[in-house]
Amino acid sequence: MNSLVTGAQTGAQPPIHDGELGTEALPEPRSQGSLVLRKFLRHKLAMVSLGVLVLITLVTLIMPMFWPHGYWDASFPSYEEPSAEFPLGTTQVGKDMVSQVLRGTQFSLLIALTVAVVATLIGVVFGALAGYLRGFVDSAISRLTDLFLIIPQIAAAAILVKVYSGSWYIVAIVLALFAWMPIARITRAEAMSLSQREFIEAARASGAGTGRIVFKHLVPNMVGTITVNATLAVAQAVLAEAALSFIGLGVQSPDTSLGRVISENYAQMQGRPWLFFGPFIVLVLISLCINFIGDGLRDAFDPRQRRVKA
């Protein structure tokens, strides 16, 4: 008792006995963002894929500055076999294959990112408005989504790219026009669920308008779904662009892409396989890495996922 009185007079804290915890011993609550990041960092396959994708991107951006052969240079002998000077040989027109793969990877990644950003913006806006407003707006957006879904993507994209030339940004915009529908459907379903929550009712009661509710309350609470679907849209855009370019209706000269490089050299698969498998392996690696990263993000944002996958 005397020690308690003395502690109160001096301002010292009373001693903590066994079985009692001080406030400073309690762990600080983790935020949702830190929990998601922790789960994502523990996803081994996603981490390896992220490292490989970052490495490919850095090599693609930095290596052309030091590589002695330019992608435009066609002064080399045709069909040189792999050597120290030409690790992947040369093409039929005398271009270094390594420089072609580097240039093609740059454009493929640029197209994929553009498609993902544009398709995500369109899909999120349409899906959130349809899920929140419902009624006529929901019906109109849903019918528009159904209309775009029944149009053959590759055929329509090939026609539009052919009509409006094959510059990389034209290809990206055309592919984005046929990539937003799945994102819109998923966003619509989640917006319909969130619009019944108490915080949305409170926002309505406070007089918030539709725009503020959708973009300040609904969309921030769907960031997990949006992030995962945007990541997967990148992988789909890489393959869609490669398919278009492979049939000769994608990126046109002077631009290039991995699909175009593969298309120009697929006939050499048996005689000179390095010309085909060089860009093909890079394309497959990019697609696989992005898909595995998307899987890691999906598991990290899933509150029901307790066990971290290897």
Image: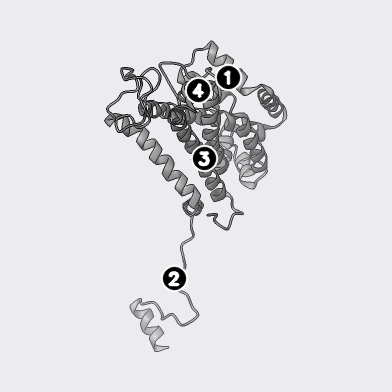
Tag 1: amino acid: Ala
How much space separates mark 2 and mark 3, taking CA atoms? 44 Å
Q: CA distance from mark 2 to mark 1?
A: 61 Å
Q: Are marks 2 and 1 in contact (CB under 8 Å)?
A: no
Query: Which kind of residue does numbered mark 4 sit on?
Result: Ala
- The picture places residue 28, in percent across and down from the top left corner, at 46, 62
Q: Is residue 292 left or right of residue 73?
A: right
Image spot of residue 160 (x, y percent): 56, 15
> Could you tell which of marks 2 and 3 lies nearer the N-terminus?
2
Q: How is the image coloured?
A: one colour
Element assignment for label 3: helix
Q: Is residue 250 above or below residue 231?
A: above
- Horizontal and vertical percent for residue 293? 50, 44
Foreground: disc 2 or disc 1? 1
Of the residues shown, which amino acid type is indicated by label 2?
Ala
* x then y, percent, for residue 76: 31, 20
Frontmost of labels 4 and 2 is: 4
The Cα–Cα distance between marks 3 and 1, rounded to whole angstroms, is 24 Å
- Which residue is more in the foreground, 231 or 51? 51
Ranked by sequence position, the earlier of labels 4 and 3 is: 4
Q: Are marks 4 and 3 in contact (CB under 8 Å)?
A: no
Q: Which residue is mark 1?
A: 157
Q: Amino acid at mark 3?
A: Leu
Tell me the number on the disc at residue 25: 2
Q: Earlier in the sequence, mark 3 or mark 1?
A: 1
Q: Confirm or deny contact between disc 4 and disc 2 (CB under 8 A).
A: no
- Which residue, given by chain and number where applicable, does mark 3 sit on? 288
